Image (cartoon, rainbow, N blue to C red):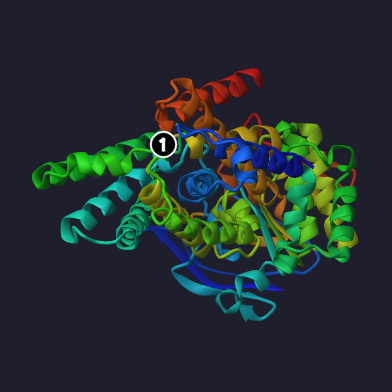
Amino acid sequence: MKIILLTILLLFLSGISLFVGVADLTVGDIVQWDREKISLIFVSRIPRTLSLVLAGIGLSVSGLVMQQVTQNKFVSPTTAGTLEAAKMGLLAAMAFLPSSSMMIKALFAFCFTFAASLLFLRMVERIRFRNVIFIPLVGLIFGGILNAVSSFFAINLNIVQDMNAWMMGDFSGVLQGRYELIYICLPAVFLTYIYANKFTLVGMGKDFASNLGLNYRTVMNIGLFCVSLTVSTIIITAGAIAFLGLVVPNVVSLVYGDNVKKTLPLVALAGATFLIVCDIIGRLLIYPFEVPIGLTVGIIGGAVFLTLLLSRR
Amino acid sequence: MIEVKHISKKYNNRVVLDDISLQFPKGKVTSLVGSNGAGKSTLLSIISRLLQQDNGHVLVNGKSLTDYKNRVLARHLSVLKQFNHIGMKLTVRELVSFGRFPYSENRLNAEDHEIIANAIRFLDLENIADAFIDELSGGQKQRAYLAMVVAQDTEYILLDEPLNNLDMKHSVQIMKILRRLADELGKTIIMVLHDINFASHYSDYIIALKDGGIKYHDRTEKIIDENILKDVFDIDFVISESGSKKVCNYFNH
């Protein structure tokens, strides 16, 4: 029921999103089949809305998986060095293969992200002091180190600006022919759904999962694979959006619990809806200019999260 | 039957278990007792494949643990450790449903649903079946975990300190449930217990460990003896009869 309502809301907002923008576009233009306007829709508006939906789904589902795998509610692509690792991969691609296609860049980003996730997980396992706040702090430090290394090479190679432009979460540059890579996150999300029950068990800890006959390590690695694939393709096509993977799964968990099979569709839909709303607000606030989406996500998400956290106590 | 053959385990050169061999009788309640660091929990973890031993084998129904597929073993043997330590927000029914995971993974069939309902009834959880476990009291939580194990429907149930953090009333409640699991459903129960009086009242056999070895292994009434207990725990006991059971007083010695 909630899923149906959320889906309708998402479709409605996607519709609105299609008609928000600098170039004037109304439903009437479509009815009259104005060629110029139609091509605007297909070249710019539909790619933008679709990639918003996919990035929203992908990043929030990735956050959910990471929180299960590390058994920590505060771990997300932002707080585990994942984004920084993708950045490093991007840098490597730009340094070694300057004229590489987006596909190759994404592949580099994926490899780095996957390796960094495995490394982070090993670190988490070795930490005996399992404080809830301690693990994301380690993640932030880990990300900081990766970032420092990337910056060093980026400065030497004179591509700091280039790289930052890639990393900046921005959907205004999403155009037909340049965003299709983001579809790769769909199979990853689908795989996550198939493994939903296993991710719930992984979240209950090694002993608990082993008791129920789960191949703990395999499921963890599959989770990290999905996360790395999703995050790296989204970063290449749209850039990084902080906090989405932290806020959305936590808000859903506060209300509906941690049964991944049950909450995953909600997390996905809520993530997409939330990102679309933030994007519309960002586009309207200082029209005809745009507020970076990372900013709106951070402010609105932070406020929603804090309110929920405080009202539940 | 579970058989343990020549199990040894070291942590950083410190011997925790030294050449342990044991057999656990079917359909009975067996308690592992001993001081802190005697190796009880380590032994339980090895028998339940949560920990890898350095030497020796564990045989479940004549077959070595390592020859079982994880999922198949999970239909024969279940283990609960660190009862209160799952930071997940699941409802009682969801938790109990995961007991069927080794059988049906994602799709629960009609039989699974019936087993889940029975397990919830067996542990008297019907009125809180849809509550989140993180909102329950310690005793209710414990019962919810046990219900999951009941739904898992294994011949062998291994428990590490099932009474940890429970008050007296709930401890008695849990022990009575475990007794019923053995007597009514024919389960074999092996558990680590700290309270010698609970072991005395509710178990059929007691295994006493000391310094990584088995000191005594016998029927409960034989083990509850002033000299034997003194040998195991290094403190004096005064034992009195209460009905057909023995009560140990060690509070002032």
- Relative to B137, say whether B2 is above or below: below
* Residue at numbered disc 1: A136
- From this viewpoint, is residue B197 visible? no
Spot occupied by residue A99 in the image (x, y as percentages of width and height): 21, 60
Spot occupied by residue B251 in the image (x, y as percentages of width and height): 66, 31
Spot occupied by residue A220 in the image (x, y as percentages of width and height): 50, 58
Q: Amino acid at mark 1?
A: Pro
Instruction: Output the chain of dot 1.
Output: A
* Residue name at image x 42 percent, y 43 percent: A77
* Residue name at image x 65 percent, y 70 percent: B71
Q: Nearer the viewer, residue A50 or A249?
A: A50
Direction from residue B59 to residue A84 in the image, left or right = left
Instruction: Name the image quarter holding the C terminus of chain A.
Output: top right
Direction from residue A194 to residue B184 in the image, left or right = right
Could you say whether the residue bearing mark 1 is in a helix, strand or loop?
helix
* Residue name at image x 63 percent, y 36 percent: A13
